[in-house]
Image (cartoon, helix red, strand yellow):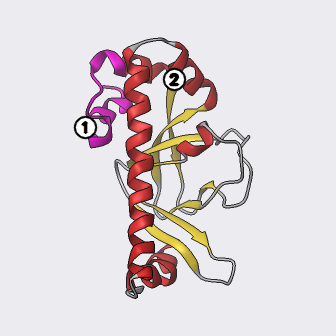
Amino acid sequence: MNELDALLDIPLFSEFDADDLTLLRRVMEVRTHPKGFRFVEEGKRAGSAYTGMFVLLDGMVRVYATRPDGGYAVDKPMGMGNVFGMVALIDDGPRSATVQALTPCTVAFLGKPGFEELYSSGLAVSARFQRLLAKQMVGDLRYLGGLLQEAIDGDDSALVSAMTSTSVVADAD
């Protein structure tokens, strides 16, 4: 059994089938990283060997972005099945957040060359992958929009909590 077979157990990949997995095995690779490893760094441009999308197969990461006046605009842990870094597949601009391993991690990685091969395949998997990216980005926007709406409504406790979380910060050291 290939480690990438676990993708089919992740809800975000629920539309994919065994045939799709054959292509995903060709364009994705499994990587392991130690605790403390930085997958993505806020403000740095895409363009390295780590430019691409990561799917957590095992372990925990911390996603955080700083505010100009200090503190954290986003600070949340993510575990198995979560996806990050997909914007770099589409946009070469500076990264919007840092993602750091809280524990040793195993990820399925899709780099730009694999992404381009996936899209040039002309197969239905390409359309399913587009929906996957859209679902992930919509989920991210809803999360951030919810925090913003709560702050606008005068209840900024969730936003403040996300910006000042110390439990996640302590685990990252």
Mark 2 surroundings: few (<14), some (14-19) or many (≥20) residues within 10 A: some
> Residue 105's x, y, as percent?
46, 52
Q: Is residue 17 magenta?
A: yes
Q: Amino acid at mark 1?
A: Asp
* Residue of label 1: 9
User: Which type of secondary structure does the marked residue at label 2 adopt?
Assistant: helix
> Residue 35's x, y, as percent?
52, 61
Mark 1 surroundings: few (<14), some (14-19) or many (≥20) residues within 10 A: few
Which mark sits nearer the N-terminus, 1 or 2?
A: 1
- The residue lying toward the viewer, choosing from 5 and 84, is 84
User: What range of the chain is rendered magenta?
Assistant: 1-20
* Residue of label 2: 27
User: Which type of secondary structure does the marked residue at label 1 adopt?
Assistant: helix
> Residue 60's x, y, as percent?
42, 59
Q: Picture quarter containing residue 20? A: top left
> Residue 8's x, y, as percent?
28, 32
Asked whether the residues under the numbered discs 1 and 2 touch, taking CB atoms below 8 Å apart as contact, a structural biologist would say no
Q: Main secondary structure of the magenta part?
A: helix
